Image (cartoon, rainbow, N blue to C red):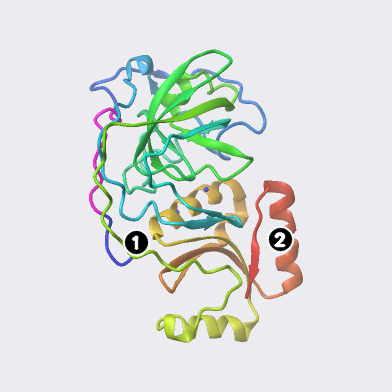
Amino acid sequence: MVACGGQPPKPVEAPVSAVPPAPTFEKKPGYTLKRGGGFYQDDGPADDIPVDLASVPDAVPQVEPLHRFANRPYSVLGRDYTPLQTRAPFRQQGIASWYGRKFHGQKTSSGEVYDMFGMTAAHPTLPIPSYVRVTRPETGKTVVVRVNDRGPFLHGRVIDLSYTAAWKLDLIGNGSGTVIVEKLLAGAAPPAAPVAQPRQIAATESIPAAEKPNAPNVLRDIEERGEHYLQLGAFGNRDNAESLRARLALTLGELGDRLLIRSASNLYRLQLGPWPDISEARRIAEQLQSSFDLPSVLVR
């Protein structure tokens, strides 16, 4: 669980991600969701869902250019991610989860609006956009989805599915399950527009004064007051930082009110704080690790 100097280009909409016209609705079924399931705290199925989810077509692989911003290297929760930008085959097995009503209508990492009733998914490193076949090996059920978002970043999960995709794979009740993810190709895609890659800066690395013309006063004030922050991620695109903040705000409860995004040297850093006492910051860091499995980096 979130713009930079220029707005990202209008994304190419996948023809299969829209909800079929004029669906009928019924109240959501009374699923018993297991503890530690696949969606974030306070998330879940919609109050009303289309009765014809089975008729929502799978995504159809299209030739699309790579998103200008969403494929840059980034860091989340102490881990560095380098999105793939090649047509090489990709196959992965692991735990899939899903996200629902709390993110319905919000921006994804691609800048598109998340539609929980479409056939989309979030993946940490697959190109945006790209298409994958997701299969449950124990049942043989399979779906094809369009990757247009980043995540998941917790509990070793490999992909976050839209509500409809998870429903088709019978993952709603359990919240998560083992899947096989395979990238699908649709001919030769045109190359992405060339962009300058920002230098990756470690969370604890100081930023040279010449690189941060607008930041010195803020950083100096923090240093003088002795305030401490826990850094959870660093991105070259503000939309990615906002997307993660939205997700973590649901997970962290009251602590989520302390999430903020600070920009310096073309990076948008998601941080939690401040705490005037370093021992308190360390205590919170331990709480994040033990209660939420969230690593963090202490910065001042």
Instruction: Give the residues in magenta.
Output: 9-18
Tell me, for residue 284, which label it has, or none: 2
- What secondary structure is found at the residue carrying circle 2? helix
Quarter where residue 175 is shown = top right
Instruction: Mark 2: give few (<14), some (14-19) or many (20+) Cα within 10 Å.
Output: some
Quarter where residue 203 is shown = bottom right
Residue 134 at x, y percent in the picture: 46, 25
Residue at x-position 66% and y-position 55%: 295
- What secondary structure is found at the residue carrying circle 1? loop
Q: Nearer the viewer, residue 28 or 118?
A: 118
Residue 33 at x, y percent in the picture: 61, 25
Which kind of residue does numbered mark 1 sit on? Ala
Q: Which residue is tagged 1?
A: 3
Image marks 1 and 2: residues in contact by CB distance under 8 Å: no
Which kind of residue does numbered mark 2 sit on? Ile
Q: CA distance from mark 1 to mark 2?
A: 29 Å
Residue at x-position 49% and y-position 81%: 218
Which of discs 1 and 2 lies nearer the camera? The answer is 1
